[in-house]
Amino acid sequence: MFKKILVPLDGSEHSRKIVGWATGLARALKAEIILLSVIDPEEIEILEATTRGLERKSESVGNGGAISSVARTPSDVINDAIAQAEKDLQVEADRVNSAGVTAKICVSAGSPAEVIVSEAHSREVDLIAMATRRESALARGILGSVTDRVLHSTSTPILTLYPGEIHDFDEANGGPKRVIVPLDGSALSESAVKPAVEIAKAAGAEIIFTEILRLPFFGVGVAGIEYGAGDYAGDFGIEAQKVEITEYLQGFVCDAEASGLKASANIRTGSPSQQIVEEASEIEGSIVVMGSHGAGGLKRWVVGSVADKVIRSARRPVLVIPPKTG
């Protein structure tokens, strides 16, 4: 299922850190990696505007007061940027190749999010791996920019990785140690089962099927509607729900075990996003594989999906399976 992994890099240390993790995953999946760099013409124009005055002043001093500038078109600058990006990407590609994974490079010009989505489609990639970064737990960081736009503009699965928890390239391993699959009984959540099982098999990882039992009382918190945890006078049918959920999850456990995987089920209580994040944080090397409703517009920005909240809060890799991927 995952044979081509697209890894967009922007030249920052944040984005470069994901190459090692993606290489470990690609090695386990026997997949190839495509390293992509996007040259944004708007950024080139801004850079040109801020440096043009300094260049003209330098030329004036060097020519005894006379200005003699060499005309450089925006295309010249973009071509130079592309050439430099190709050199930088090749250095990364060489490291990936030396680790036993086939790597190709691609440099293109345009709006970053649009180019990433377009390249993913035209190259028929199976997965896009992108770094997330944020100034704080509440800041959207890059999720308010390129990663966020790509996440809600493509039907290609996206693996988001938090740079602060990713080791250097040389420490890349064969993939995750534990795969967490949040389920809620919907076909959308179950669409994550197949890719999760594939990753677990390839990496020799344990797979955990989990469902969050939402309590009947809630309030409005920073992240929107939040479900509380506490002691209540009655169980509100909670025990009966737990029995039903256990039976539901056990079906996936049995299927996974039949395919040779170490599998288990887990029921947690409280806020879905918070509980998923907490479960992922308990063991290093965990990855969350989950479906996303992909809702756009005002609804998503006001309410937010569970996947959005997990991506913004988790310090673990999160693989999001959009609706159209099945």
Image: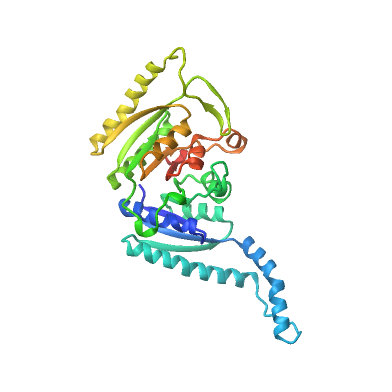
Q: Nearer the viewer, residue 217 or 33?
A: 217
- Is residue 217 something one can see in this rendering? yes
Quarter placement of the C terminus: top left
Among all residues in the image, which is located at the extreme bottom?
64
Name the residue located 34 percent from the left edge and 46 percent from the top edge: 176
Name the residue located 34 percent from the left edge and 19 percent from the top edge: 243
Instruction: Find residue 11 and report its horizontal and vertical position in percent.
Output: 51, 62
Among all residues in the image, which is located at the extreme top?
234
Up-down relation of residue 228 to residue 144 (above or below)? above
Instruction: Find residue 38 and report its horizontal and vertical position in percent.
Output: 53, 60
Up-down relation of residue 249 to residue 93 (above or below)? above
Disc tally is: 0
Up-down relation of residue 71 to residue 326 (above or below)? below
Instruction: Find residue 2 and report its horizontal and vertical position in percent.
Output: 36, 49
**In this figure, which colouring scheme has been used for the structure?**
rainbow
Up-down relation of residue 309 to residue 74 (above or below)? above
- Is residue 185 something one can see in this rendering? no
Among all residues in the image, which is located at the extreme right?
65
Instruction: Find residue 107 and report its horizontal and vertical position in percent.
Output: 50, 63
